[in-house]
Amino acid sequence: MAKATARHILVNSEEKCEALKAEIEGGRDFAEVAREHSTCPSGARGGDLGSFGPGQMVREFDEVVFSGELNKVHGPVKTQFGYHLLEITSRS
């Protein structure tokens, strides 16, 4: 079965998500931004979600995590929880 590791940042608006993505693409550390801004408890771990398989996260996550480019910031990805930036750190 496929497995992936990823980290994410959850915020409540698409605009904030876009602004944070620009900061990261401009050289800011993803984990630092997650600790400062993410509303998910994983923010305390720099957004680290650990390892998971298909179907363990919401559908919108799976679509990005199991098909997107590794080590690139994806998003905003809208889910019922808000807006996410995702970074896929590994996939097998």
Image (spheres, rainbow, N blue to C red):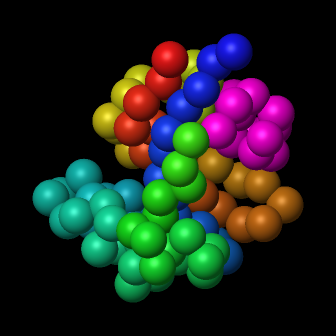
Q: Residue at x 40, y 79 (%)?
A: 35
Residue 11, image quadrant: bottom right
Segment tinted magenta in the rendering: 52-64
Image spot of residue 32 (x, y percent)? 29, 74
Q: Can residue 16 be seen by looking at this rendering?
A: no
Does 50 appear above or below 89?
below
- Give the quarter of the figure containing the N terminus: top right
Q: Can residue 45 be seen by looking at this rendering?
A: yes
Q: In the image shown, does 59 or 23 lie closer to the viewer?
A: 59
Image spot of residue 83 (x, y percent)? 65, 62
The reply, left or right, for residue 85 in relation to residue 3 is left
Residue farthest bottom in this picture:
36
Q: Residue at x 84, y 60 (%)?
A: 80
Image spot of residue 92 (x, y percent)? 50, 17
Queried whether the magenta region covers residue 63, the answer comes back as yes
Queried whether the magenta region covers residue 57, the answer comes back as yes
